[in-house]
Image (cartoon, rainbow, N blue to C red):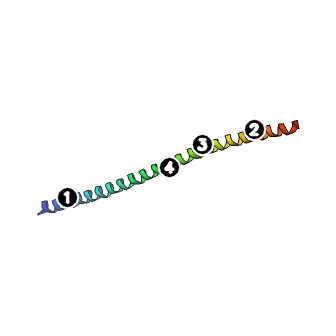
Amino acid sequence: MMSFEVFEKLEAKVQQAIDTITLLQMEIEELKEKNNSLTREIETSANGRESLVNENAQLKQEQQAWQERLRLLLGKMDEV
């Protein structure tokens, strides 16, 4: 009789362990998904930043070109 109770307790503990492991596996999957999602967000942000840096460089070049044209134009007006 005594060994049957011990066996029942052991069975309950094993079942509890299985339930805990199952829950933890679900949590791990959830965290993996969040991690992937955050990784994608970081990549998107990095791409957006890179594109803004490129656009900024292009605008600076255009600004310099316009300044040069203006300088030349003002130089010609001084000659008149």
**Is residue 19 positioned above or below 42 on the image?**
below
Q: Which residue is mark 4?
A: 44
Q: Measure how far apart labels 2 and 1 are at the Cα level.
A: 86 Å
Element carrying mark 1 = helix
The amino acid pointed to by label 4 is: Thr
The residue drawn where x is 29% and y is 57% is 22
The amino acid pointed to by label 3 is: Asn
Q: Nearer the viewer, mark 1 or mark 3?
A: 3
Q: Which residue is mark 1?
A: 10
Q: Measure how far apart labels 4 and 3 are at the Cα level.
A: 15 Å
The residue drawn where x is 57% and y is 46% is 49
Q: Which residue is mark 2?
A: 68
Q: Which mark is residue 54?
A: 3
Element carrying mark 3 = helix
Q: Measure how far apart labels 1 and 3 are at the Cα level.
A: 65 Å
Query: Depth check: 79 or 22 in front?
Result: 79
Image spot of residue 62 (x, y percent): 68, 42
Quadrant of the rendering where the C terminus is positioned: top right
Image spot of residue 12 (x, y percent): 21, 61
Using a 10 Å C-alpha cutoff, classify the residue at mark 4 as few (fewer than 14 neighbours), some (14 to 19) or many (20 or more): few
**Numbered circles on residues, count:** 4
Q: Measure how far apart labels 2 and 3 are at the Cα level.
A: 21 Å
Q: Earlier in the sequence, mark 4 or mark 2?
A: 4
Lateral position of residue 28 relative to residue 60, left or right = left
Image spot of residue 14 (x, y percent): 22, 57
